[in-house]
Amino acid sequence: MRSDIDLLETLSRNVMRGSLCGLGATAPNPVLTTLRYFREEYVAHVASRTCPALACRDFIAFEIDEETCTGCTACAALCPVDGIAGTRKHLHVIDAAVCIKCGVCSDTCTFDAVETVNAVDTGQ
């Protein structure tokens, strides 16, 4: 059985060859180029459902580092879904079931206590 990535590559080449116009003939180029230079990224996404770049919302999670968190409450105050629990000067915790992975907590934290991790590594 051929892998999804191999099928994507074959389909792209077939579209290129079978196209009746210049636009159709060049449309697969971005796919073929990224497959050539970033195949391992595709494999990670398809095979292990992880994103090495930590850019895909479906494959990431946010965690608060207990060593770095000062309990300033900035992240909790700005979380649009109230998904961060904690009191002033105490460790805060992100509720993964509520988190919409918007990144506001990470952008807000001036102490860099919010880490972006692969969700598969956290069991999510």
Image (tube, rainbow, N blue to C red):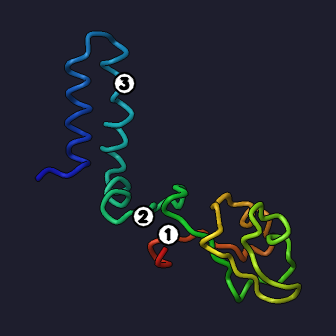
The residue carrying mark 2 is 50
42 lies above or below 97:
above
Q: Residues within 10 Å of mark 2 (few under 14, many from 20)?
A: many
Q: Amino acid at mark 3?
A: Ala
Count neighbours of disc 1 (C-alpha within 10 A) and say few if under 14, some if 14 to 19, many if 20 or more: many
Q: Position of residue 30 (x, y in %)?
A: 39, 33
Q: Residue 118: which numbered mark, if any?
A: 1
Near-viewer residue (98 or 49): 98
Residue 89 appears in which quarter of the rendering?
A: bottom right
* Badge 1 element: strand
Q: Residue at x 45, y 62 (%)?
A: 52
Disc 2 vs disc 1: Cβ atoms closer than 8 Å? yes
Q: Residue at (85%, 76%) from the top-left corner?
A: 73
Q: CA distance from mark 1 to mark 3?
A: 31 Å
The three-letter amino acid code for the residue at tag 1 is Asn
Measured along the vertical axis of the image, is residue 71 above or below residue 120? below
Residue at which label 3 appears: 27
**Residue 40: image x %, image y %?**
33, 57
Toward the viewer: 98 or 30? 98
Tag 3, which secondary structure? loop
Marked residue nearer the N-terminal end (2 or 1): 2
Q: Are marks 3 and 2 in contact (CB under 8 Å)?
A: no
Q: Quadrant of residue 112?
A: bottom right
Residue drawn at (71%, 89%) of the image:
67
